Amino acid sequence: MSVRVPLSSEFVNGDVSFWYRSAGVPAPGPRLDGGLEADVAIVGAGYTGLWTAYYLKRARPSLRVVLLEQEFAGFGASGRNGGWLTGDLAGSHERYGTGARRLQREMYASIDEVIAVCETESIDCDLVKGGVVNVARTPSQAARLRESVSAAREWGIEEPDLRLVDPAEHVRVAGAQAASWSPHCARIQPAKLAQGLARVVRGLGVPIYERTPVTEIAPQRAITPYGTVTAGHVIRATEGFTARLPGLRRQWLPMNSSMIVTEPLPPSFWDEVGWRGAELLGDMAHYYMYAQRTADDRIAFGGRGRPYLYGSRVDARGHTHEWTVEALWRLLTEFFPAARSSSIAHAWSGVLAVPRDWCSTVHVDPATGLGWAGGYTGHGVTTTNLAGRTLRDLILGEETELTSLPWVGRKVRAWEPEPLRWLGVHTMYRLYRVADHRERAMPRTSALARFADLITGH
């Protein structure tokens, strides 16, 4: 690693994520040993699969529910994300249309639902509902921030839900020119939530067969090297790993996101930057960042690294390229110059799923029993809970407020074949980086960023 980036003596790159560091990466449980029958087979033991199993068993304890996982529960994005339990939509209000207001309210309510379940089930995941601050560090970013708050009013997001604040009110970011605040966000420790849910689900009688990759999904069948699970419903909950399944390489684009975390910072640092609570922190750049103050007083700081690997390949081990670590450290110390006396303890990457229109979907086909939820575009910590409850109702054949939300049954076209897919994504992020640089001296959004949006339908 470059000497420009101070690394702690125990620095780790990859090894899933920092979130598993204190407890250690869990040893995978037993794999499937022969075929079996179930009522519901769920492929993928991340948040989507775990929440779906949880709500199904709570609603119908007699249901035979099985989880199939190629690694261990919480191995993917569920154990690597930035720990934002956010009310932001995983998609665009405009694209969801007239039902977007109801979907937004359900997202806000889902935060409190997760909190309630964690309290009921004794899941300790460092959860604090501290809200979220978004900062603007250039005139163009400030203009976009004000426009976003104004536009939110058109979708029923009122002053108590989102408002402009003094840039120094919650967290003092160097160079911040404007800021917004929303109470609808909570900090979590992602791996603790995933492992806690897995414990609860197992306690409800749901077997989680780990080290059991599913090689094919078909009506009433989930096929693995160790046996086939036959079930009335087969639910795909594979998010960023969906492209590995036959016929689904272009369904959702696996997008990489990367993080670093500092060593614990002293009380003097937190006093200097005014970050006294558990607020989450984001910004209005095109090549955006996201951060949290961890329960043990570190900064976990994330952003885009190498956004996409050719052919929808996935680097499952979480290793982060040197230049990505350098870029994240440089940006972190731009935000907080006082952090330069610290060092990086861990760097890692994870993969999220992006549909062609950047809007999430949830669906169950009553004719075939096949279903899925995903395409969370980085907003999955909260959206997976809503997805789990919605899948429960769809699987049980119940017509509810959740099953009438606009993301249910939404059809999205596939991504382009290679090399167009690779060229489009890398061109988009190259343009975003250049746009962010140019906007340091511009009062409005760069035309390059608008062109990048057009390329990929962002």
Image: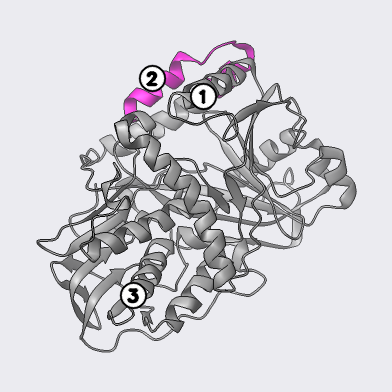
Q: Amino acid at mark 2?
A: Phe
- Residue 370 placement, left or right of 359: left
Which is closer to the viewer, label 3 or label 1?
Answer: 1
> In whole angstroms, how far apart are the C-alphas of marks 3 and 1?
40 Å
> In whole angstroms, how far apart are the C-alphas of marks 1 and 2?
19 Å
| Residue where numbered disc 1 is placed | 148
1 or 2: tag closer to the N-terminus: 1
Q: Main secondary structure of the magenta part?
A: helix
The mark total stands at 3
Residue 15 vs residue 124, the one in the foreground: 124
Q: Are marks 2 and 3 in contact (CB under 8 Å)?
A: no
| Residue where numbered disc 2 is placed | 451
SS at mark 3? strand
Please provide the residue range marked out in magenta. 435-456
> In whole angstroms, how far apart are the C-alphas of marks 2 and 3?
42 Å
2 or 3: tag closer to the N-terminus: 3
At horizontal 90% and vertical 47% (from top left) the residue drawn is 268
Q: Amino acid at mark 1?
A: Ser
| Residue where numbered disc 3 is placed | 67
**Residue 425 pos. (x, y %):** 37, 35
